[in-house]
Image (cartoon, rainbow, N blue to C red):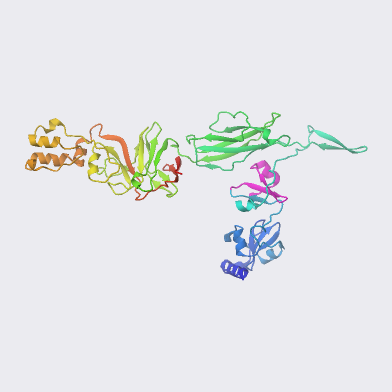
């Protein structure tokens, strides 16, 4: 009953696509095909293997979209292979099959073993590897196949007048002249990744020489545009390279092997890769992180400019486990006065806190630079932690024209405070008018914004979230520039 329902469903799925019209599609190893009925087959070694039901089909990791429709005569001309009725054990690949794992690594099946094929154009050509005919396989399925020896490159050169010969006696008066098999030295790069988003790039490599143990080979490397000459030969089989992106994004890495005879591979292995990191990589750093699950206002990220130039960080993004992209907002030069937001430019050797919470002044995301008058805002808005309370006081000589009672009152007013008018001066219009105009945030900004030390190298930037953004137990925060390129990364674990 299970089989009947499975294949009845398939008929309804594929009928609108002209199943019964047939197709001229040629089949190849690893294809999923079906004819005019609902049966699905896997092509292996020129045979068609029937997949009995949906559970097995999906268990093998196959997708409905990969099924090809073929003409009945093409299907009928294929010999029947073993039925596939168990997704865990019944999928048997024949010798000579090439497999591709989830990372693009190549394996050759021989005698029921999977043999890793190092990425080498020479080797691929020698063994007849064709990526188009290789079968993709999940890691779970691949791990079910026993591991065999690594495939090595062995070549027998053409016989020339300089070839070395061995004379082998096989009977009385009968000798055979044989060409000695010379195994060339070969180098390969095991790293297949050609796209990096980190500043530290690690490239792994190796070599083969049938005349000696591979562990006795040594290697020299060269990174175009970075190295001035090839590195000295060493036994290391990987190289870690720190790159900052200032030399561009495209790189070419080469490596060559040398054996104990001093012979050097004349055709180095080459890896071309792209480095997608920002020109500001490690110039702006995540200097500190404070994570808080209970109080979003205390959750913050501190960025520091370690370069010798000012850098604009507005429109840069932060990424974490919970949020895929948080944009660093623009700032107001003077809060509540300059409403037009501008790019935030972080000066050299300065830091800025990015607070997860909503800006308490504007009730949205955004920020501002601290100035000498912001202490007045502590009395109007709930700001945590409080802004600095060092608002300038009126100059003494500016008060000389006021009555003694008025002068005494103004001198007793605390910094950053808009006082309540006392009864004793309420009838003094000159006094009360001056107090109402100057002893508040707007009046303070008007009086002192042109003073040299009015602005302070300190900023508040709010990301605009009502709840905490970052995971306080285990978090990785990634900072990217406006082009989406990596600038810095920070990880913190609380357990």
| Depth check, front residue: 215 or 29 | 215
Image quadrant containing the N terminus: bottom right
Q: Position of residue 158 (x, y in %)?
A: 76, 38
Q: Position of residue 475 (x, y in %)?
A: 45, 45
| Depth check, front residue: 109 or 48 | 109
Looking at this rendering, what residue extends furthest in the left direction?
A: 427
Left or right: 166 in relation to 356: right
- Name the image quarter holding residue 188: top right
* Residue drawn 69% across the image and 31% down it: 259
Left or right: 452 in relation to 100: left
Q: Is residue 105 magenta?
A: yes
Left or right: 107 in relation to 224: right
| Depth check, front residue: 171 or 249 | 171
* Residue drawn 63% across the image and 51% down it: 142
Q: Relative to residue 65, is residue 228 depicted above or below? A: above
Q: Relative to residue 103, is residue 403 depicted above or below? A: above
**Visible in this render: residue 487?**
no
Q: Relative to residue 253, is residue 475 depicted above or below? A: below
Q: Relative to residue 267, is residue 380 depicted above or below? A: below
Q: Position of residue 39 (x, y in %)?
A: 64, 66
Left or right: 453 in relation to 34: left
- Name the image quarter holding residue 387: top left
Q: Is residue 194 magenta?
A: no
Q: Position of residue 346 (x, y in %)?
A: 36, 36
Looking at this rendering, what residue extends furthest in the front direction?
A: 495
Residues in magenta, as a range: 103-131
Disc tally is: 0
């Amino acid at each position: 009953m299970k089989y009947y329902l499975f294949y009845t469903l398939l008929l309804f799925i594929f009928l609108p696509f002209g199943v019964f019209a047939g197709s001229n599609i040629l089949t190849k190893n690893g294809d999923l095909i079906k004819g005019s009925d609902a049966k699905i087959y896997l092509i292996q070694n020129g045979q068609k293997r029937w997949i009995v039901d949906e559970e097995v089909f999906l268990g093998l990791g196959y997708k409905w979209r990969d099924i090809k429709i073929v003409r009945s005569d093409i299907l009928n001309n294929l010999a029947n292979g073993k039925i596939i009725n168990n997704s865990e054990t019944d999928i048997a690949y024949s010798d000579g099959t090439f497999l591709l794992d989830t990372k693009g690594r190549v394996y050759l099946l021989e005698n029921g073993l999977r043999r890793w094929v190092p990425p080498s154009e020479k080797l691929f050509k020698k063994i007849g590897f064709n990526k188009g005919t290789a079968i993709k396989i999940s890691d779970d399925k691949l791990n079910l196949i026993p591991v065999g020896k690594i495939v090595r490159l062995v070549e027998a050169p053409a016989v020339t007048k300089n070839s070395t010969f061995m004379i082998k006696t096989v009977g009385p008066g009968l000798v055979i002249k044989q060409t000695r098999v010379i195994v060339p030295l070969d180098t390969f790069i095991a790293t297949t990744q050609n796209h990096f988003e980190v500043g530290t790039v690690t490239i792994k490599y190796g070599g083969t020489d049938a005349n000696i143990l591979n562990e006795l080979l040594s290697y020299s490397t060269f990174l175009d545009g970075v190295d001035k000459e090839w590195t000295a030969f060493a036994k290391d089989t990987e190289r870690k390279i720190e790159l900052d992106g200032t030399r561009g994004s495209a790189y070419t890495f080469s490596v060559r092997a040398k054996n104990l005879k001093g012979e050097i591979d004349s055709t180095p292995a080459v890896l071309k890769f792209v480095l997608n990191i920002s020109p500001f990589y490690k110039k702006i750093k995540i200097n500190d992180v404070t994570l808080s699950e209970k109080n979003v206002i205390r959750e913050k990220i501190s960025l520091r400019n370690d370069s010798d130039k000012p850098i604009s960080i507005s429109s840069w993004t932060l990424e974490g486990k919970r949020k895929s992209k948080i944009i660093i907002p623009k700032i107001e030069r003077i809060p509540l006065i300059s409403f037009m937001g501008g790019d935030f430019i972080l000066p050299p050797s300065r830091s800025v806190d990015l607070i997860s919470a909503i800006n308490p002044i504007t009730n949205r995301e955004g920020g501002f630079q601290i100035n000498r008058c912001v202490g007045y805002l502590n009395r109007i808005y709930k700001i945590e932690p409080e802004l600095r309370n060092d608002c300038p006081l009126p100059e003494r000589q500016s008060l000389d024209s006021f009555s003694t009672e008025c002068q005494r009152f103004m001198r007793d007013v605390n910094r950053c405070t808009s006082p309540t008018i006392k009864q004793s001066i309420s009838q003094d219009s000159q006094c009360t008018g001056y107090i109402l105009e100057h002893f508040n945030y707007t009046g303070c900004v008007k009086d002192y914004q042109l003073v040299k030390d009015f602005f302070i190298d300190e900023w508040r930037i709010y990301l605009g979230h009502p709840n905490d953004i970052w995971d306080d137990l285990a978090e990785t925060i990634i900072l990217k520039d406006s082009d989406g390129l990596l600038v810095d990364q920070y990880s913190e674990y609380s357990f």
